[in-house]
Amino acid sequence: MQMTNATTYLKLAGSLAIAGAIVGRAVSFAVPGRSSSAVIQMTERQDLQRPVPQDALDERFALQLGNFEEIYSAGASLEDMIRHIAVAVHVRHRVREHLVQACAGDWPN
C-alpha cells in the first residue's frame, strides 16, 4: 500500500479508529464490571435493661444513613467507608476504656 496523499492517511486513521472502537466495545463486554454487591447492615444493639424507643433508633439510623451518603457522594469507595466506620468504633472503644479507668481511679498521671 502506497501513501500518495493526505486523504489516504485520513482513510487509514479513520478505519483504524473504527476498528479500535469495535474491538474496545467487544472487550468491554467480555470484562466483568467493577460493581459491588456489598450490603451494609445498620442495626443498634438492644440493651434489655434500658430499651431505646423506636423513634430514637429511627433518628440514629437517619443520621448514619446521612453520613454514609455524605461519604459516598464525596467519591469514597466502600473500602474507605468501612475504614471510616472501623476508626469511629475504635475511637468510641478507646474513650470508653479511658472513662472506665478514670472512674476506677487507674488514670495515669
Image (cartoon, rainbow, N blue to C red):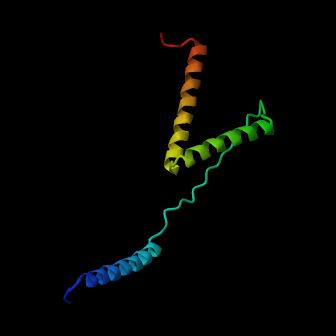
Image coordinates for residue 50, horizontal then vertical, percent: 77, 30
The residue drawn where x is 52% and y is 40% is: 84
Q: Is residue 93 left or right of residue 60?
A: left
Q: Locate the N terminus and report the quarter of the image it occupies.
A: bottom left
- Decide which of 2, 103 is in the foreground and name it: 2
Q: Is residue 95 left or right of residue 54?
A: left
| Residue 61 against residue 93 in the figure, above or below | below
- Farthest-out residue, bottom: 1
In the rendered image, is residue 79 in sight? yes
Image coordinates for residue 57, horizontal then vertical, percent: 75, 39
The residue drawn where x is 30% and y is 79% is: 13
Image coordinates for residue 71, horizontal then vertical, percent: 56, 44
Q: Is residue 79 left or right of residue 48?
A: left
The number of numbered badges drawn on the structure is 0
- Decide which of 7, 74 is in the foreground and name it: 7
- Farthest-out residue, top: 109
The residue drawn where x is 65% and y is 43% is: 66
In the rendered image, is residue 44 in sight? no
Q: Quadrant of residue 96?
A: top right
| Residue 98 against residue 47 in the figure, above or below | above
Q: Quadrant of residue 38?
A: bottom right
- Decide which of 54, 27 is in the foreground and name it: 27
Image coordinates for residue 79, horizontal then vertical, percent: 49, 48
Q: Quadrant of residue 51?
A: top right
| Residue 45 against residue 11 in the figure, above or below | above
| Residue 5 against residue 93 in the figure, above or below | below
